Image: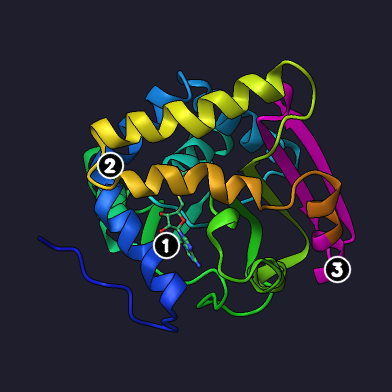
Amino acid sequence: ETVKPYKDTDTDKKQQVADMFNNISGTYDFLNHFMSLGIDIIWRKKAIRALKTAKPQFLLDVATGTGDFALEALDILQPEKIIGVDISQGMLDIAKEKIAKRRLSDRFEVSLGDSENLPFADATFDAVTVAFGVRNFENLDKGLADIYRVLKPGGKAVILEFSKPKGFPVKQLYHFYFDHITPLIGRIFSKDYRAYSYLPESVARFPDGRQFTAIMHQVGFTEALYRPQTFGICTIYIGTK
Ligand code: SAM
């Protein structure tokens, strides 16, 4: 077992989140695609395509997990290099397996790192990406501010995150699926069913749409846009420094 507990700027919540992802890392990819019926792949591609015209060469993928968002960015944008950071060693170990298998080690590197205290100098990256990560940050403002800090002037942040659909009947269907079905699937397939009860709870209390772009503006982004996907189940946020 190579999983080490996260121990940097440790706090209880952060440690709990890291432990939770260490626990579910083995089934994470499968459950992602299964629970979203594969739609997560389409959302990821669409979010990354928002960076196409900017042609970023040096990218940071925050909360990279098992690396799927960064791998999509490598494929679509063909940058020189992507660095991925995450607080869960278990998730990073899966990313490392993919990197080795696809012989991408010169273009994609991953290491332990906290979104709220990124181990990089100011103005380092052309673009920063985060998929399904910001919701887990202990302190959202601090995480977004640090993403802003490591971006070069003119650089872009692309953030993909769950949001709350508002219209009938999608809102009702969504709540039924998210509140009852995903915890059940999680309970059957994952080692940690609490992780999949945590999912709907964490989406419910998380800011979305205009509320989220307001926080992006507060931390300094000059431009912040949002594009709801699939009836608002998920939203792509694009910020410019
Ligand atoms: N980006 C990947 C994807 O799209 O599949 C992984 C998303 S996964 C739902 C969330 C990830 O955020 C986990 O791997 C977790 O360890 C990581 N995470 C949570 N809080 C973090 C933080 N403060 N800094 C860095 N990573 C964090």
Q: Position of residue 219 (x, y in %)?
A: 80, 70
Residue 124 appears left or right of 16? right
At 40% across and 42% down in the image, what residue appears?
Answer: 196
Q: Is residue 210 above or below residue 142?
A: above
Q: Is mark 1 within 8 Å of ligand 1?
A: yes
Q: Mark 3: give few (<14), some (14-19) or many (20+) Cα within 10 Å.
A: few
Nearer the camera: disc 2 or disc 3? 3
Q: Earlier in the sequence, mark 2 or mark 3?
A: 2
- Alpha-carbon neighbours of circle 2 within 10 Å: few (<14), some, or many (≥20)? some
Q: Which residue is mark 1?
A: 86
Above/below status of 9 relative to 185: below
Q: Residue furthest left?
A: 1
Compared with residue 181, is residue 201 higher up or lower down, i.e. above or below? below
* Identity, as a three-letter code, of the amino acid under mark 2: Lys
x, y (%) of residue 10? 41, 82
Instruction: Point out the stretch of residues depicted in magenta.
Output: 215-241
- Neighbor class of circle 1 (other Cα within 10 Å; few <14, some 14-19, many 20+) is many
Can residue 32 be seen at all in this image of the molecule?
yes
Q: Which mark is residue 218?
A: 3
**Residue 88 in the image: x percent, y percent?**
34, 62
The structure residue drawn at horizontal position 62% and vertical position 37%, both measured from the top left corner, is: 48
Residue 233: within the magenta? Answer: yes
Residue 111 x, y percent position in the rendering: 36, 66
Residue identifier under label 2: 98
